[in-house]
Image (spheres, rainbow, N blue to C red):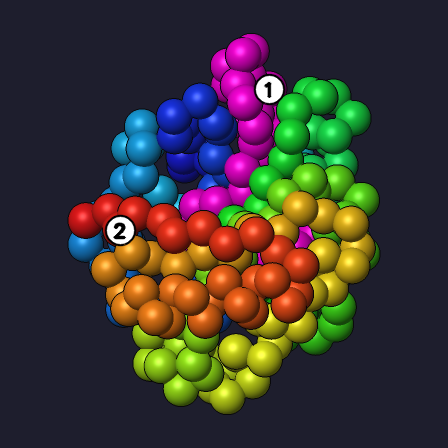
Amino acid sequence: MELVYRVGNSLYLNLTNRCSCACTFCLRQDNDTVGESQSLWLEREPTAQEMIEAIKAADTDGRSEMVFCGFGEPTCALDVLLETAAWMKNNLGLPIRLNTNGQGNLINGRDISSDLAKYVDTVSVSLNDPDPVRYQQLVRSKFGDQAFPGMLTFAENCVKAGMNVVMTTVDTTISHEDEDKCRQICSRIGASYRIREWIA
């Protein structure tokens, strides 16, 4: 199973294929790979020890950061994420980023921001759209109407917990006017805003 893969100068960690969303623009609808990976579909979810061993076997020298992001929502495997992040924080000395749909509190039934803040430096949250209805049409979350406010609360809690929070949209999915609305949301929360390129 491919647990660690390279994108640019970062190493990405593939914890799970589970996700609370079925985004209309999700890469995994048509692809098996991202970056220099071969296939990100997992036969089963790895343990934290398996993740740590895979990281030890990878070339971490000169890497810019470690990123929790694979073919699933990393917070669906929160215990493995936290144990792996704790080991990396103590042994690698590299910044740690979490790429997430922002529904981790809903997935785990509690506020997880304080747990993440012990190890994670940056949280990148997929904002996707400033309108709750259009957001749900894009991401098709299993949490329905709870998904959008839950994502905003998660992002705000991560800011309050002291992490660097970046909220993102995909450049082909919304108008420039809606991008301005997203900037206003991020400003209110205390997060940065980034428009990311859509990759076919």
Up-down relation of residue 62 to residue 42 (above or below): above
Q: In this view, which residue lies farthest toward the top?
A: 61
Q: Is residue 27 magenta?
A: no
Q: Quadrant of residue 171?
A: bottom left
Q: Is residue 61 magenta?
A: yes
Point out the tag, 2 or 1, that comes first from the N-terminus. Answer: 1
Image side of residue 68 versus residue 189, left or right: left
Q: Cα distance, mark 2 to mark 1?
A: 31 Å
Image side of residue 56 versus residue 200, left or right: right
Q: Residue at x 67, y 59 (%)?
A: 190
Q: Residues within 10 Å of mark 1 (few under 14, many from 20)?
A: few
Q: Quadrant of residue 9?
A: top left
Q: Secondary structure at mark 1?
A: helix
State which region is magenta.
51-79
Identify the amino acid type marked 1: Lys
The disc label shown at residue 56, or none:
1
**Where is residue 3 drawn, in percent x and y?**
47, 35
The disc label shown at residue 95, or none:
none
Query: Looking at the image, which is closer to me, 109 or 184?
Result: 184
**Where is residue 149 drawn, in percent x and y?**
59, 80
Q: Residue at x 26, y 51 (%)?
A: 198
Q: Secondary structure at mark 2?
A: loop
Query: Looking at the image, which is closer to me, 54 or 104?
Result: 104
Identify the amino acid type marked 2: Trp
Total marks shown come to: 2
The disc label shown at residue 198, or none:
2
